Amino acid sequence: MIIVDSCGWLEWFTDGQLADRYKEYLANTDKILIPAIILYEVYKVLKKEAGEEKALLAAGYMQKATLVPFDDALAFAAADIALQEKLAMADAIILATSQAHCCQIISSDADFKDLANVKYIPKG
């Protein structure tokens, strides 16, 4: 199982410059975990930039993967990770989810660049 960070989903859904690099990870939703915070981020950005219809279509596709709700156990783990790694809330939730489910994060977010168990795809 893998977690693809919101930047990867947004690249793919908007046909960004890294869309082809993320395609191999996003084509098979059976192998993807999606922390609820990523669904939130992708829907919000797409609705703002591409409209509600595109945002809903993307969310529908994403919901074919395994959605991981944000519960009390993840909240405590994410808070500890945020303090330890000096990460923003969303990034800490994503990292806590990956640790709880023993899976790799695929991301172009520089905040994840040097963390263990992250496949970093540089921008540009």
Image (cartoon, grey):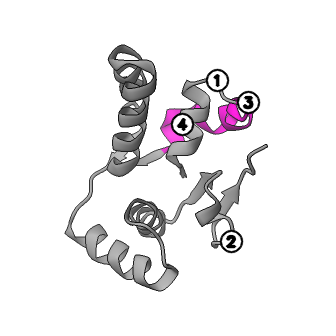
**What residue did someone put label 1 on?**
15
- In depth, the one of 66 and 118 nearer the eye is 118
Q: CA distance from mark 1 to mark 4?
A: 10 Å
Label 3 element class: helix
| Residue plotted at (49% across, 78% down) | 86
Marks 3,4: beta carbons within 8 A: no
* Secondary structure that dominates the magenta span: helix
Q: Amino acid at mark 1?
A: Asp
Quadrant of the image occupied by residue 113: bottom right
Label 2 element class: loop
Q: Residue 102 at x, y = what percent?
A: 51, 66
**What residue did someone put label 3 on?**
20
Q: CA distance from mark 1 to mark 3?
A: 8 Å
- In depth, the one of 98 and 49 nearer the eye is 49
Q: Amino acid at mark 4?
A: Trp
Q: Amino acid at mark 3?
A: Asp
Work out whether mark 3 precedes mark 4 in sequence or the reverse, and give the earlier one.
4
Q: CA distance from mark 2 to mark 4?
A: 21 Å
Give the number of the disc on residue 114: 2
Does residue 49 show up magenta in the picture?
no
Query: Which residues make up the magenta segment?
Result: 17-32
Q: CA distance from mark 2 to mark 1?
A: 26 Å
Mark 3, Cα crowd under 10 Å, few <14 / some 14-19 / many 20+, is few
Q: Nearer the viewer, mark 1 or mark 3?
A: 1
Quadrant of the image occupied by residue 10: top right
Q: Amino acid at mark 2?
A: Asp
Work out whether mark 2 precedes mark 4 in sequence or the reverse, and give the earlier one.
4
Give the number of the disc on residue 9: 4
- Horizontally, residue 25 falls left or right of residue 84, namely right
Marks 2,4: beta carbons within 8 A: no
Mark 4, Cα crowd under 10 Å, few <14 / some 14-19 / many 20+, is many
Q: Residue 66 at x, y = what percent?
A: 38, 43
